[in-house]
Amino acid sequence: MGKEGVIYRVAGPVVTAVGISPRMYDVILVGKEQLMGEVIKIVGDKTIVQVYEDTSGVRPGEKVVDTGQPLVAELGPGLLSSVYDGIQRPLPVLRDRMGDFIERGVSAPGLDRSLKWPFTPVVKKGDTVAEGQVIGTVPERAITHKVMVPPGIGGKVDMIKEGEFTVDEVVAVIGGKEVRMMQKWPVRRGRPFARKMAPEEPLITGQRVLDTLFPLTKGGTGAIPGGFGTGKTVTQQQLAKWSDAEIVVYIGCGERGNEMTEVLTSFPELTDPKTGKPLMNRTVLIANTSNMPVAAREASVYTGMTIAEYFRDMGLNVSLMADSTSRWAEAMREISSRLEEMPGEEGYPAYLSARLSEFYERAGRVVSLSGETGSISVVGAVSPPGGDLSEPVTQGTLRIVRVFWALDTKLRERRHFPAINWLTSYSLYSGQLDGWYRQNVAEDFPALRNWAIGLLQKEAELQEIVQLVGSDALPDEQKLTLEISRMVREIFLQQNAYHPVDTYSPMSRQYTFLKLINRFATNAAKAVENEVPVETIANMELRNRLAKSKFEENIEEELKAIAETMDKEFEALGGK
């Protein structure tokens, strides 16, 4: 243990100590119960510590101990399917020890020290290895866990063993240094990599409005801002379930307990569509609810990101969900006011934007030190008070992220889900991904998407005229535009997250839907030219059939049948 000192002052989770001379971000054990905290400011001989636990009952004069170490995450086999709090204490272990309510001053290691893992070396004695290189593999749930040389170590392999070991047993000696299956890494520092690459491949989510209109790339950054009840959490859960990333890190940062409960109860029961096994096998959950101490909420985001970077270094694609970054910013604001710092806009600290960009900067598609290509895609939910998107956290996030999925209270009131507003949302990756879509979906996919977006914008302009003069006053072509855009909205953009067929829509099906609506529009335009009334076209059985098809078990056959009969049904309408 390091140097000891005493508490000088206590202000909520912010404790001032004297008698120690630590470095910034060192972990300090505070008081009789040895509550865990972190140095956030040093003024002369006074050290200011943010404590990750409730400080009620702690008083001046009690002992503090400097551990001499920053807050670190334990990385190694055993992370997958774990449920941690913000400072990587395993919640199931704590519950077994003390029931449903966590007492103060309790700690448990992030990785189980008693479990033995079968380690198979991939290098031999005498080989020369560099930092980040894979030296062995361990089968773990949904993946083959690669054991890598920790950053800062390299040289000749003096010894390497095969067999079953716990995470803190020595499995190799490299350049005279012992290497274990477990690595420790300071959470506030990004893990090193060889180089960053341009994001060129979409993160397929199976959600039509996202994949087609506003795509996110592997290694991209996105934000979902929206007021209360607009569906941020359901959208993020859909992304966690269906996105084609190998690993999901879900950070419930300051969310309500019942929302985290929903995640904790639904995830273990979900079946991974890729493997048929439970989705939890490739998920790490960090649960830090709103009634937990604020300081741990601030740390939870960094803990989650460090775990994601570790899997990225193995060459895996990780999707990280932070729900919600507003609560994280609120924790920063609370601690900043206790430190009596100069407040910025709406009381948030002046460094809010810098902290947000530090976090999102750690996303990306990289070539790791071992030469593998891995990625971290980050989606942060933002909960602006009263749904006001001009507040500082939303604005700070928008300056950084490249995809903006704006949730809309008006759409929620109309029961249109996902309630993503197609007029205010955007993706700056669309142009970059056109080549991928042409190659992997269809040559005309980007053109179809632009047609759909153009149609929805035209509808918004026409709606203003309709509100003034009524839809009857419009010419037939414009009435038809309104009908077709309604089909795009109701058939294509609306999606039921709880329906077994509609919850996930592969890219091929998204293309087929859009193509059919486009073909319907072309046929309908010809019919209107031949003086077929727009009402007749709107009431066609074919239109209802297309709307119902997305819930059909044998959806692919149904869509094929609709495509075959469409031209004939339009011919049957007659006209001039």
Image (cartoon, helix red, strand yellow):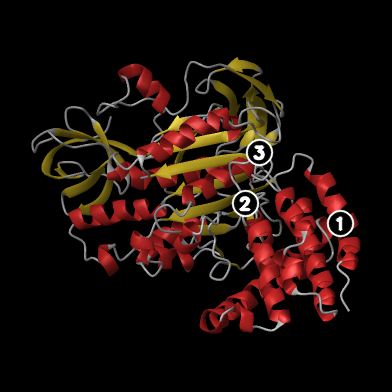
In percent of the image, x 74 and y 73: which residue is there? Answer: 534
Q: Amino acid at mark 3?
A: Pro
Q: Is 210 situated above or below 476?
A: above
Task: Check disc 3 and report its element: helix, strand or loop.
Answer: loop
Q: Quadrant location of residue 138?
A: top right
Tag 1: Cα neighbours inside 10 Å, few (<14), some, or many (≥20)? Answer: some
Task: State yes or no: discs 1 and 3 in contact (Cβ < 8 Å).
Answer: no
> Is residue 111 rendered to the left or right of residue 561?
left
Type of the residue with mark 1: Ala
Query: From the viewer's perspective, is 552 left or right of 71?
Result: right
The residue under label 2 is 495
Q: Earlier in the sequence, mark 3 or mark 2?
A: 2
Upstream in sequence: badge 1 or badge 3: 3
Compared to 476, does 220 lie above or below? above
Residue receiving disc 1 = 563
Number of other residues with Cα within 10 Å of mark 2, as a class: few under 14, some 14 to 19, many 20 or more: many
Residue type at numbered disc 2:
Gln
Picture coordinates of residue 504, whole percent (x, y):
67, 45
Q: Secondary structure at mark 2?
A: loop
